[in-house]
Amino acid sequence: METEEGKPAVHKLISEEDVAVALAKYIADLSDKSVKGKGSFSIALSGGSLIHTLRKLLEPPYKDTVAWSKWFIFFLDERVVPLDDPDSNYKLAYDGFLSKIPIPSGNVYAINDTLSPEGAADEYEGRLKDLVKRKTLSISVTNGFPKLDLMLVGMGPEGHVASLFCWHFQRYEKKRWVTFIKDSPKPPSKRITFTFPVINSASNVAMVITGEDLASAVKVALGTHSSDFIPLPVQMVLPEGELAWFLDMDAASKL
Ligand SMILES: O=C1O[C@H](COP(=O)(O)O)[C@@H](O)[C@H](O)[C@H]1O
């Protein structure tokens, strides 16, 4: 592991299996600390390969020791499709993870799949605001955005995170908590997504990156680059809290 004051912790592991093992311990430790400290743990899930990489949490010791009933689950981004559609991040997370652990269903914040992208983004943002009012979620004292305990962030080969893509203005959003996109370059086209101010207000952000196709974007994100270069979305992940990268050997191969 590489750590330096003010820099992310970069965990370079051999295989995706090793990433899954390290990630489970990291999440379980954060959950434990958060539940002991304030009685809850709020976590936002990406879709894609991340869900499979969570599998070690479903095994002993974590399955029986994590305080699942204290978890509040959110979606970093979601495709605006029915919740039982194969493209739904909720369905992926439910089938591969959430259905296998005893999290109260009321603590899982899926989008309202009957609404338009604009409507679903507004509605999701409204629910976050309500949770802040009820003190289920805390708020960043520096900027007033919600402060989740952990964001689990995946990445696409061209450096997108959540549904914040390179040539799309949503990644520069400064006021909204949740925004929408109707022309995602990666199908399906209609999506909602947390904005960077929300992602970057989290107490902890974990970049979970495996596979050779992601090595070039990892190199850009973690290597040195000129300041007049237009950043990839992944380079805009700059949390006020702690940032940790979990990489397998293939993803780290160009570092
Ligand atoms: O479309 C999406 O893509 C990214 C990356 O997915 P992966 O399969 O390459 O890991 C994912 O993080 C995001 O949540 C999802 O909606």
Image (cartoon, rainbow, N blue to C red):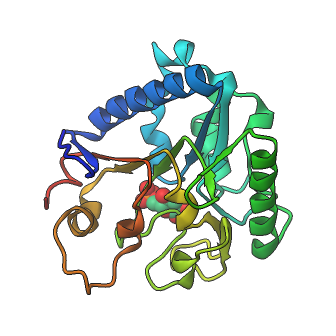
Count the labels in the image: 0
Establish if 239 lies above or below 197: above
- In the current view of this chain or complex, which residue is farthest to the right? 114
Of the 4 image quadrants, the one containing the N terminus is top left
Establish if 80 lies above or below 167: above
Q: Residue at point 63% right, 27% down?
A: 38
Residue 101 visible in rendering: no
* Displayed quadrant of residue 174: bottom right
User: Where residue 44 sits: x, y (%)?
Assistant: 58, 47
Q: Residue at point 82% right, 50% down?
A: 130
Establish if 41 lies above or below 174: above
Q: Is residue 245 left or right of residue 104?
A: left
* Displayed quadrant of residue 123: bottom right
Of the 4 image quadrants, the one containing the C terminus is bottom left
Q: Is residue 95 left or right of residue 209?
A: right
Of 111 and 37, which appears nearest the observer?
Answer: 37
Q: Residue at point 60% right, 43% down?
A: 93
Q: Residue at point 27% right, 65% down?
A: 221
* Displayed quadrant of residue 105: top right
User: Where residue 91 sits: x, y (%)?
Assistant: 67, 48
Residue 231 visible in rendering: yes
User: Where residue 134 sits: x, y (%)?
Assistant: 81, 41
User: Where residue 201 sits: x, y (%)?
Assistant: 53, 55
